[in-house]
């Protein structure tokens, strides 16, 4: 069973699910280089189709991550499928508007029709059901659990709870936009001067510098919904949101951001960010924890952009109510294509066994010949290393900052050792070096480490195995002394624990670095500059290398130095 998943909207993406497992997943931004691209993900779709045709054969179904019409997708499919597109994707409203405005017909040119599809069913999956499927059908557990999805809004829903049991998702609660904690947090992010839908991680990082019990406490109470006992007790009217299309990506605006900005001027940026984080954590706990009791479960699976907030995930973990916590690593809208495809697969072929997520290296890959050809035509000086992990470890031990490009590109927002920028963490100044010389971003922002899974107790307190940087944990005193650049101001760390079997080359790099320095941990940030998507191709990596303060680049077995 082969299902192609498609998401059109914020973080447009495509994914391929074969027999219940994600085998390909990529966001359109990685191909077109426009961050959070919201257009038709035709290049991501073509990547998934080529992978299917090369390794899996023709697809059996197309899953679309919305219950609403998508005119652009409908017309594109109509030009590529042998027969009419699914009627459920057509929109009479769009036809009437086009006639009224005398707009040109929406139809793709010939060169966008080259890869044809067989006649296959096109099945819509509601936005939050796709989020829920991405979390539940990758959790690897057959036990009954609570599935929670939270974001700004999708198909009119902002928050939903589900019972995951016997391989099926049963809805428990669905709440509309008046319950949106995602919109609340995005509103504060906009007021702080950052992109709503992108800068929420900055808000979270800045919050650690504020006082949760300071003068700003309670100042945001009139800007968010309130939960108690697992229910929405005070809905919030956010008004009608507006948006701005900037280079194919959507920038959202909420009217209350103007008022929140006045509070920032009164109380300070750090204080308001800290209050937003406090509100988010407390309100999510007020919703989720009673449902754990009601359902009698201690396992949870989560998705939706709200769960990209690693401090929130840490707060839930530290309640002591969870024996198992699974956050789908591509929790934002970029993961909807995979979720929609998973939902369609398990709806058409239901079974109780739920596979575990094997990894996030699901994007394009390049052969050594392609990489070397890329270097040759650019007339670059390079060397082929017999052991690139050894060479990288030695460079890092000498204090270098390196770009590390290996295997398949990661899907989701985190670099996990395939498209990474790496640096040692023993010198506290290294964080500032990365921000100022390499990433060109705000000085307060922390960096996450990758570490050997077997050494997690040396650096982390009470941490479960976490391979995808989805949750932060408290740092040990020893970690704060040994690797201060990896520890945030609130004494937490958001780690990736590297397993030898899952990623042998990256594991070897960390192991050799440990032998050379005594530390089995490295700072690992995404291979990109601020405001750009993660690099995808060798040429992307080369451009980033020469446009930043990186000292060296390891592309597969090839090493470049400045």
Image (cartoon, helix red, strand yellow):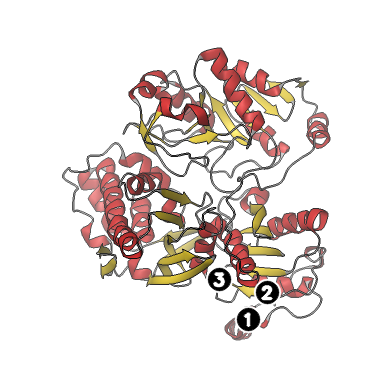
Callout 2–callout 1 Cβ contact below 8 Å: yes
Is residue 365 or residue 145 the one in the foreground? 145
Q: Disc number at residue 88?
A: 1
Q: Return the x and y of residue 20 as percentages of the image width and height.
A: 65, 60
Q: Disc number at residue 66?
A: 3
Among numbered discs 2 and 3, the one appearing first in the sequence = 3
**Residue 134 versus residue 71 in the image, above or below:** above
Q: Residue at x 72, y 21 (%)?
A: 387
Q: Residue at x 71, y 46 (%)?
A: 364
Residue depth check, mark 2 versus mark 1: number of the one nearer the observer: 2
Q: Disc number at residue 326?
A: none
Helix, strand or loop for disc 3: loop
Q: Disc number at residue 122?
A: 2
* In the displayed structure image, the side of residue 395 where residue 327 appears, left or right: left
**Residue 87 versus residue 144 in the image, above or below:** below
Asked whether residue 550 appears in the rendered view, the answer is no
Helix, strand or loop for disc 2: strand
Helix, strand or loop for disc 1: helix
Is residue 93 or residue 231 the one in the foreground? 231
10 Å neighbourhood of mark 3: few (<14), some, or many (≥20)?
Answer: many
Quarter containing the C terminus: top right
């Amino acid at each position: 069973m082969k299902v192609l998943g498609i998401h059109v909207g914020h973080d447009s993406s495509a994914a391929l699910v074969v027999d219940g497992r994600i085998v390909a997943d990529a966001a359109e931004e990685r191909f077109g280089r426009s961050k959070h691209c919201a257009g038709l993900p035709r290049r991501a779709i073509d990547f998934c189709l080529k992978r299917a045709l090369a390794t899996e054969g023709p697809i059996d179904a197309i899953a679309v991550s919305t219950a609403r019409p998508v005119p652009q997708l409908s017309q594109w499919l109509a030009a590529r499928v042998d027969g009419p597109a699914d009627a459920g994707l057509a929109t009479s409203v769009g036809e009437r508007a086009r006639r009224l405005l005398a707009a040109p017909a929406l139809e793709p040119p010939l060169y966008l029709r080259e890869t044809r599809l067989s006649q296959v069913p096109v099945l819509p999956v509601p936005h939050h059901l796709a989020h829920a499927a991405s979390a539940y059908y990758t959790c690897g557990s057959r036990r009954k659990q609570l599935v929670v999805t939270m974001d700004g809004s999708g198909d009119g829903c902002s928050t939903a709870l589900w019972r995951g049991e016997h391989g099926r998702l049963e809805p428990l609660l669905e709440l509309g936009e008046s319950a949106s904690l995602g919109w609340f947090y995005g509103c504060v992010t906009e007021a702080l001067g950052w992109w709503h839908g992108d800068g929420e991680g900055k808000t979270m990082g800045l919050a650690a510098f504020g006082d949760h019990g300071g003068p700003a406490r309670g100042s945001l109470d009139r800007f968010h919904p309130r939960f108690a006992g697992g229910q929405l007790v005070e809905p919030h009217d956010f008004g009608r949101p507006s948006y701005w299309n900037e280079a194919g990506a959507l920038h959202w605006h909420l009217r209350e951001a103007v008022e929140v900005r006045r509070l920032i001027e009164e109380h300070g940026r750090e204080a308001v960010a800290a209050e937003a984080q406090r509100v988010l954590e407390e309100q999510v706990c007020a919703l989720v924890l009673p449902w754990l009791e009601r359902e009698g479960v201690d396992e949870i699976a989560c998705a939706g952009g709200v769960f990209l907030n690693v401090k929130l995930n840490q707060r839930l973990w530290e309640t002591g109510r969870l024996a198992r916590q699974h956050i789908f690593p591509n929790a934002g809208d970029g993961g909807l294509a995979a979720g929609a495809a998973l939902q369609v697969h398990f709806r058409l072929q239901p079974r109780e066994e739920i596979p575990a997520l094997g990894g996030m290296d699901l994007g394009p890959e390049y052969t050594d010949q392609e990489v070397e050809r890329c270097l040759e035509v650019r007339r670059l000086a390079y060397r082929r290393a017999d052991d690139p992990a050894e060479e990288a470890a030695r460079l890092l031990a000498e204090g270098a900052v390196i770009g590390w490009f290996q295997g398949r590109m990661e899907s989701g927002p985190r670099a996990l050792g395939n498209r990474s920028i790496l640096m040692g963490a023993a010198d506290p100044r290294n964080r500032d070096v990365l921000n100022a010389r390499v990433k060109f971003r705000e000085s307060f922002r922390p960096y996450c480490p990758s570490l050997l899974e077997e050494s997690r107790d040396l650096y982390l307190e009470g941490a479960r195995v976490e391979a995808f940087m989805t949750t932060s944990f408290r740092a040990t005193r020893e970690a704060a002394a040994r690797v201060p650049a990896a520890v945030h101001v609130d004494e937490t760390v958001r780690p990736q624990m590297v397993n030898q079997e899952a990623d042998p080359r990256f594991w070897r790099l960390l192991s050799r670095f440990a032998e050379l320095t005594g530390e089995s941990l490295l700072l690992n940030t995404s291979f990109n500059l601020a405001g750009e998507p993660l690099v995808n191709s060798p040429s992307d990596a080369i451009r980033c290398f020469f446009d930043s303060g990186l000292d060296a680049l390891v592309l597969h077995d090839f090493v470049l130095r400045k």
